Amino acid sequence: MKYDALVIGAGIGGMESSLKLGDMGYKVLLVEKEASVGGRMILLSKVFPTLDCASCISGPKMSSTINHPNITTVTYGEVKTIRRDGDGRFHATVRQKARYVDPAACTGCQECEQVCTVAVPDEFNSDLVARRAAHIPFPQAVPKKAVITREGTSSCTDTCPAGIKAHGYVSLIRSGKYEEAFQLVLDATPLVGSLGRACYAPCEAECTRGDLEAPLPIRRLKRFIAERHYATHDGPGVQPGEPNGKSVAIVGSGPAGLTAAWQLARKGYRVKILDSAPEPGGFLRQAIPVYRLPQEVVEQDIRNVTALGVEIVTDTRVDDLQALEREGYDAVLLATGTPKATSLGVPGEETTAVVSGLDFLRDVRFAEAPDLEGKRVVIVGGGNVAMDAARSARRLGAVDTLVAYRRGREEMPAHVAEIEDAAKEGVRFEFLVSPVTVVVDASGNVTGLRCTRMKLGEPDASGRRRPEPIPGSEFVIKCDLVIPAIGLVPDTGPFDSHVAVSRNRGIQVDPKTLQSEVPWLFAAGDVVSGASDITHAVGQGRRAAHMIDRWLNGGELDGFEALDDRLAAIDKAKVLSRQKSYTHRDPVKLDVSHVPAPRDFAEIEPVLTEAEAHFAAGGCLDCGVCSECGQCVATCPANAIDLSQHEQTFEVDVGAVVVSTGFKLFAADAKPEYGWGKYPNVITGMQMDRLLAPTRPFNTVLRPSDGKVPDRIAYISCTGSRDKTVGNPLCSKICCMYSVKQNQLIMGALPLADVTMHYIDVRAAGKRYDEFYEESKELGAAYIKGRVAKVTEKPDGNLILHYEDIENGGGLAEAEYDMVVLAVGVQPNREVERLFEGEPLGLDEFAYVAEPNDDLNPGQTSIPGVFVAGTASGAKDIVDSITHAGAAVAQVAAHLEKAAHTLRVLKEVAR
Amino acid sequence: MSTTREVREIIREEPLMHGDILRALSDGPHTVPEIASAIGKPSDETVFWVMGMRRYGMVVELAEPTDEGFFQYAAVKKADGEDEAR
């Protein structure tokens, strides 16, 4: 793309430059980093010395700018780099940040703001009030289009293998929107209750709050919303999709199969699940002990699926997949999990007193477990099945339950909480041992397990150190029952002739599409990956449903946004750096009463109370800012929200550049003696301008400490200006006059208030400025000459100014006020330094953009073809900024015309 | 009672405080110090929450301040069918 001029920054200087260049017929690209044009002027109450409404002056200029036929405006954009080419023109790279809103569809109705669940400080109101992550920058924004602040995917959401928006449901719970939170999880999977009990919560391991005092109890929050929903609703509250005439058979009713069925039914597919077990649920039903996952919870979750019309047929083993295709199913999903246990491979294993962990847990679940009263049990293995088996054995009365594991505790694949809970329930551990023989007496009864001791060698392919036997270290662990729990594998034997099987006995599929070499056959969950956990299976089930839907509709097998197209995870260090300090929050206690010898299978973990859930959710740090709760998507009447947007980068070729990047306000906390950031009633001049503006954050000028209408307000001029102690010897030029302006406005808004300005000297140089100052005095504002040394706070929030009173004897004095306004100065915006590649833009000794010939050629910079407009080159008031922009525009026009003339001459010479 | 907590932290908790503040206003309009006392939180933090709720139409100020110079804020009744703030 080619333009005559690139203007950087759409404050008053940038808008003026663009408009004038556009009026001259030049094509202009205007890039503004904020989501609206207007800069700071649009945020002001009124302008001095006329007291005209700032919005009334700025508004038409903003509108003219973005509607000008010769101006292309990019808001929420950023110029990344500029390089001067050999022909004197410039090559710029421009980044368009994603708004996550379709600007063509957005009507600016602000409905998204009303329902958004994330509150952040409103930078356009100088942090005096909250805005929402979904927001319109300010009421007069141009364009008046919403934007959603997203800084990345929150760690909890990013790490979930199921693609469940953990941050989203936490923020909904924080807002008291419990059913909405349930529905957000339900959008991913019907297994809300089961996950609330049995998920190992990788989200909690990544929770940024964990770096402070403890992670949020995210899993238990999910359980809270599930219990609340199931207590008050008969069904899921979701309707099946309009029937599309297509059908899918799913083999296996575990987490992957149920989730896929749920997703497909919502898209209008007729779905039938077939399972060889007597009851549906897979491992949820057969392997997870009821003290962790009660039967009725699984049934509630499964009823979500059947409520959509999904048919579940049990006691039906499927060996012939092609028969399903012949029956007319358009696609088949294989989700049979890992029903086979890996054997120990040691002598004596064939005895009946050796039971695999999976079979043992299945027997326990169906009340067919052996009586272990007084028995000694050895569980071989270090995974979650081993922990479940050990804890179940304790509940069945085993007098001694020992977990024998060939590596150390650190290498155990079981979840840490499971290991700790097992230990609390009296399970013993023997590490670095490996079985050699099951010892059987003459009657065929198991009497022990002969083991060898192990040592850890070099890491193997899994990254864990490989265990190696120690010669001559064999010993016998006395026991009555051995439970091997060393691994689970898929049972793909019946399908070997239909579809390729991998070396780990899983079905071979494309890992992204889950489609097998047989196009109508997909596979998901543990039957593909080998033994994993519920969340991985749920994620695979979601993916399979998406891909089956794509395939049956002739689409590309891609676009699975839930897991494949998320924003990059936000850096936790960046999240924590948003605040200098964090208040400690006591974590919600896990009120589980473990007993050393549990004797029943009653659930051991209580549900969070509403107060606990609400408080716990309140600890969320909103890492990614937007929580992806989806409320804006559901509410937007124009269907304008698009969370799948990505930022875009484009290249432009321009003839000239105008730098109008404005200024930075002095950071008032750099003068700690004045108490800004420590005393609520010390505010900055910009904050007071917001309080005085028609679009103010409060209903009038109020004290931030308690909402009281202030009676006595003091101004401290030259805060951060003419002050070598903060490295800024320059006068900021505008502070005196905006203070005088605010003095007058306060006297108009609060007729009973006293206003006093503590000044060094009042600089009222400009047309009608001094008259304006004198008028202010006549209206009743007091002006005291002398520096303020410090501000202190009284217990009632009032402030004591300690100052020098030059005109009344020069002594030190004190005065009490309700509020203090710091007339902060301006500083250079140093972002401009990184813009130019190869040829740095010259800066003056104060780091403003230098104008080497400002006496004769204002607006020219050190780089030919680059010009500066407004306060980027030094402090200016609005009038001077506009005048300066006019000068820069004249320079740009001269430069462009000269370049065009040179080109014409060269062409003629060439001819 | 004032706080030294960071503004971002206070504002982040605004949605969390909606229920408590609306309950404090259930018996009629109150000033910020009264609301703060009712919910057991500092007044300066309560200003952030009340003003945020005012911005999004959950509370509204009465026309005139009290003799002590405080405005009173009232909960906004939602129309039939709308979900009452919890």
Image: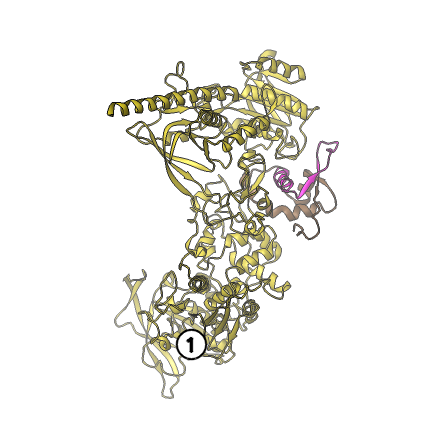
Residue closer to the observer: A144 or A87: A87
> Is B13 situated left or right of A332 in this image?
right
Quarter residue A711 falls in: top right
Location of residue A550 with respect to A619 vertically, above or below: below
SS class, disc 1: helix
Location of residue A736 with respect to A798 vertically, above or below: above
For the question of whether residue A863 can be seen, the reply is: no
Quarter residue A557 falls in: bottom left
For the question of whether residue A550 can be seen, the reply is: yes
Quarter residue A441 falls in: bottom left
Q: According to the image, label 1 marks what residue?
A: A326
Residue closer to the observer: A371 or A757: A757
Colour of chain A in the rendered structure image: yellow
- Image location of residue A156, percent across then percent down: 47, 53
What is the number of callouts on the image? 1
Mark 1: which amino acid? Arg
- Using the image, name the chain to which the residue with label 1 belongs: A
- Name the quadrant of the C terminus of chain A: top left
- Image location of residue A910, percent across then percent down: 24, 25
The residue stretch that appears in magenta: B43-72
Colour of chain B in the rendered structure image: brown
Residue furthest left as drawn = A910
Residue furthest front as drawn = A911
Neighbor class of circle 1 (other Cα within 10 Å; few <14, some 14-19, many 20+) is few
> Is B17 situated left or right of A254 in this image?
right
Residue closer to the observer: A798 or A25: A25
Which residue is found at the position 51% from the left and 21% from the top?
A877
Residue B65 colored magenta? yes
Residue closer to the observer: A368 or A469: A368
Residue A675 colored magenta? no
- Image location of residue A563, percent across then percent down: 43, 56
Location of residue A448 with respect to A798 vertically, above or below: below
